[in-house]
Structures are given as structure tokens and as C-alpha cells.
Amino acid sequence: MKAEPALILRTRQTCRQRLRRCRSRRLPLRSAVRRAVDVFFRFQYRNDRFKALWCGTEHVWMGRETFLHWALSDLDIDIPWVVATAPDAPPKAGDLLQVVRVELTAYWADQTASLPEIGQPRWLPLP
């Protein structure tokens, strides 16, 4: 049975994606995912009441599900594509997606525990 390639050919990449992908070639997958999230989202604050993080790049309060959806599916972010060239990235696209999802979930948990809390957000977070 032929293995699925983790490297998916895309017709459009942003400059930020190409730069981050180039840099992820030298990092272990876990570090590559975390650095990519830092670049694409720049979380600055947390709000425990709404279980949300302030996204500095998009200027919006973001919930966990929106974060995962954007990180995994948004064509301007697409973290699995960005980190697919990491030295320890799984060769199969499905395996890569699963490992990246696990790391994104761990990253979210770390940020909700460590970022400074801000009192009341000005608007409700995205779900």
C-alpha cells in the first residue's frame, strides 16, 4: 500500500507561510508547531470567564474551537502545511494532522494557564 505524502502541493502560499516553513526544517515538529502558532496568532491575554485568548494578529478574542479550525484549515495559516518539512514530521498526511492537532491542543492549554488574565473583554469571543 502506497503511503500518503505529508507534503501537499499548494497553489498559493503567503510570504509568512513560506518563511515559517523554511525555518521549520531545522526544528523538531513540536517546536515548529509552537513557533508557527506564535507567528500566526500572537496570543497576548486570556479571559477565564469566556475561556478565550486575545489574538494579537487578528485582534479578536478566540475560543479553542476557532483556534483549532483556523490553525488546521485556514489557507492563510495552515500550520500542518507549514511544519510538514520538520525533520521528525510523520510522512503520512493523516498522521501529521493528528500530531499537529495534539500539539495545538497542548499549546492552547499552556497559554490558558500562563498568559496574563485581562478582566472584561470588550466583545464576546469567537466560539
Image: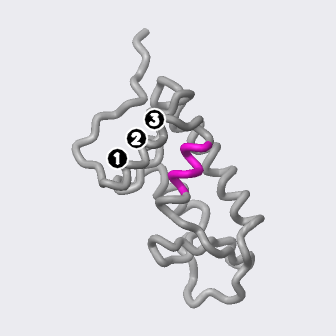
Disc 3 marks a residue whose amino acid type is Ala
Vertical arrangement, residue 15 with respect to residue 42, above or below:
above
- Report which quarter residue 120 is drawn in: bottom right
Classify mark 2: helix, strand or loop.
Answer: helix
Q: Horizontal and vertical percent for residue 37?
A: 54, 55
Asked if the stretch drawn in magenta spans residue 32, the answer is yes
Q: Earlier in the sequence, mark 3 or mark 1?
A: 1
Classify mark 3: helix, strand or loop.
Answer: loop
- Colour style of the rendered protein structure: one colour
Residue, x 39% and y 24% (percent of image)? 5
Q: Horizontal and vertical percent for residue 10?
A: 27, 40
Residue 18, numbered circle:
1
Q: Which residue is mark 3?
A: 84
**Circle 2 Cα neighbour tier, 10 Å, few/some/many (<14 / 14–19 / ≥20):** some
Residue 22, numbered circle:
2
Classify mark 1: helix, strand or loop.
Answer: helix
Residue, x 48% and y 78% (percent of image)? 59
In three-dimensional space, the C-alpha distance between marks 3 and 1, rounded to whole angstroms, equals 12 Å
Farthest residue, direction left: 11
In three-dimensional space, the C-alpha distance between marks 3 and 2, rounded to whole angstroms, equals 10 Å
Whether the residues at callouts 1 and 2 have beta carbons within 8 Å, the answer is yes
**Circle 3 Cα neighbour tier, 10 Å, few/some/many (<14 / 14–19 / ≥20):** many
Magenta span of residues: 31-37
**Residue 70 in the figure: left or right of residue 8:** right
**Number of numbered callouts drawn:** 3
Residue, x 63% and y 45% (percent of image)? 103
Q: Horizontal and vertical percent for residue 13?
A: 29, 49
Disc 2 marks a residue whose amino acid type is Cys
Q: Main secondary structure of the magenta part?
A: helix
**Residue 53 in the figure: left or right of residue 19:** right
Disc 1 marks a residue whose amino acid type is Arg
